[in-house]
Image (cartoon, rainbow, N blue to C red):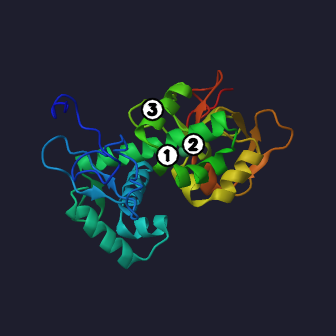
Amino acid sequence: MIPEADAAPALRAPGPPAPGHADARGHGDGPSRDSPRGRTHGRSHGVSPLPLRTVAIDRYLETIFCIAAEDEPVRPSRIAQWLGVKAPTVSIGLRRLRAGGWIQTELDRSVTLTAAGSDAAETIVRRHRLAECWLTDLLGLDWASAHLEATRLSASLSDTVLARLDISLGEPRTCPHGHAIPGRTAPYGELVALADLRPGGAGAVRRISEIIEHESFELLRALAAAGVRTGVEVTVEPGGSGDGITLAVGGRPHAIALAPETARMIWVEVVGPSASSARDGRPWPQ
Ligand SMILES: [Zn+2]
C-alpha cells in the first residue's frame, strides 16, 4: 500500500533551501555550506523575502553595528579602515547593502542600519560574542585569542548549536570584553573611562573598546598579560607620564603605563567609598 502523500511532511534530502526561507536544517542565520559563496538568509517574516545575505554582507553589517556602538559616525572611510579594504570596494559593498534594504545613507554620507539591517547585525554580533564566551569560559582561551578565533568560527555555528552553547554557558549577558550580548542587558551600572579617573580612583574593569578588540590584537594581548580583564579591580596611581596614566592592577606588584588613547577605551565601574568622587572633575575627598 502506498502511504498517503499528505499524511506527514515529506522528508527531503539536503539541498539548497528555497529562496526566502530559512535553511531547512535550521541554519537560518548561519552560512549555508551548500553554496561556495557562503550565502546566508535574511528573515522573511512570512511576507516578501529579504534578499540573501552573503558572508561579505554580514561583515559589513557587523562593522556598521560595532562602529555605531562606539558612538562614532559610520562613514564609508571608517568602514574601509575597519575592514582593511579600499574606498571603492566599500562603495560597491554599501551599494549592495542599500539595494538589499539593510542600510540607508544619510545626507552627511553616514550610514545607518534599517530595522532589517539592525536585526541581522544583532544576530551576527550575538553569535560572535557567544562564541567568544565559549572560547574563554569553557576552553580557557585568553580574550585576545578568543576574539580572533570567534571571528573565524562563529559564522559556522548553527542556531541549534548556538542555543545549546548559550544554555551551557549560563546565558551570559556580556562577551569576555564586556559588550552586552544583543537582547540582554549588561550587568553593570554607569561606566567611566580610565582616562577620566583621578589618581587614587579605583574601579572594576567592565568593558574594553571594540576598537581595541578589533584593531589592536597586540594591545589586547598585552593588557591580558598585565592582568587587565573584565572584573579585575584597578587603581590609577599618581604620577602618570604626560596625558597617560599609571595603573595598579588587581594587587599585582608592578603598575603598568597606559597611553592616553588606551585609557580612553577601557571603562570601569567605580568602586569603594570614594565612588562618587573618584571621577575627574568632581571634588576630591579631604
Ligand atoms: Zn568581545
Mark yes or no: residue 261 visible.
yes
As drawn, 1 above or below 245: above
Image location of residue 92, percent across then percent down: 31, 73
62 or 212, nearer to the observer: 62
Label 1 and label 3: CA atoms lie apart by 13 Å
Q: Residues within 10 Å of mark 2 (few under 14, many from 20)?
A: many
Q: Which residue is mark 3?
A: 163
Callout 1: SS:
helix
Which residue shows up at 67% across the image and 39% down it? Answer: 229
Q: Which residue is mark 1?
A: 128
**Label 2 near ligand 1 (CB < 8 Å):** yes
Q: Looking at the picture, how far across and down is residue 104, in whole percent?
A: 23, 59
Mark 2–mark 1 contact, CB under 8 Å? yes
Of circles 3 and 2, which is in front?
A: 3
Q: Which residue is mark 2?
A: 132
Q: Quadrant of residue 97?
A: bottom left
Query: Residue lying farthest front?
Result: 1
Mark 3: C-beta under 8 Å from nearest atom of ligand 1: no
- Of 35 and 195, nearer the camera is 35
Q: Residue furthest right?
A: 253
Residue type marked 1 = His
Given this view, does label 1 or label 3 mark the residue nearer the observer?
A: 3
Query: Disc 2 versus disc 1: distance between alpha carbons?
Result: 6 Å
In the image, 219: left or right of 158? Answer: right
